[in-house]
Image (cartoon, grey):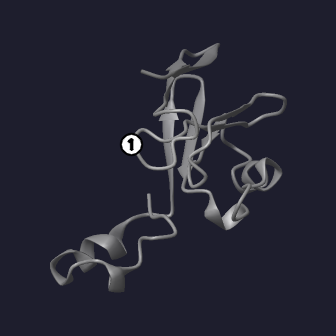
Amino acid sequence: MAGNNDRPQSWPAAERAFCRSLPRVAHLALPGGVLAVEHGHRHGWTRPSHHRLRRAHPNARLVVYGHTHRRALDTRLRPWVVNPGAAGRTRTHGGPSMAILLACPRRWWVRFFRP
């Protein structure tokens, strides 16, 4: 997904075409629903709005975003909104983390992991 730092002019000349081809949003059909993925910065700079993310993806069952590098799991409404955190070394807010989605036709689960 294209993020706020994915500007072609910031990339090496040989990789600029690839940068321009990065999608802003992706939708993936999974058993039981659609997963929507986007960077999240267009829905609030310091705290992307879960309401705005839900409104942008009304047909999704789950919206995954990043940008803040802060883990979040909001299952109060549909679609659910998840930020898996940061898997690398930068701005991990408590250490690297990741999320795993288990998607079955009738039920979905999200589990967070930290090393």
Q: Establish if 86 lies above or below 111.
A: below
Q: Establish if 26 lies above or below 19.
A: above
Side of 81 relative to 22 (left or right):
right
Mark 1 nearby-residue class (10 Å; few <14, some 14–19, many ≥20): few
Q: Residue at x 41, y 71 (%)?
A: 6
Give residue 107's position: percent from left, percent from top: 64, 14
Give residue 110's position: percent from left, percent from top: 59, 21
Side of 65 relative to 46 (left or right):
left
The quarter of the image holding the N terminus is bottom left
Q: Secondary structure at mark 1?
A: loop
Side of 88 relative to 55 (left or right):
left
Give residue 81's position: percent from left, percent from top: 69, 38
The quarter of the image holding the C terminus is top left
**4 or 93, which is in the foreground?**
93
Name the amino acid type tagged 1: Gly
Q: Residue at x 74, y 55 (%)?
A: 47
The count of marks equals: 1
Residue 67 falls in which quadrant of the image?
Answer: bottom right
Q: Establish if 37 lies above or below 15.
A: above
Q: Residue at x 38, y 42 (%)?
A: 88
Q: Residue at x 63, y 63 (%)?
A: 41
Instruction: Report which residue position mark 1 lands on.
Output: 88
Residue 78 falls in which quadrant of the image?
Answer: top right
Give residue 69's position: percent from left, percent from top: 56, 47
Determine the residue located farthest toward the left in the rendered image.
14
**69 or 76, which is in the foreground?**
69
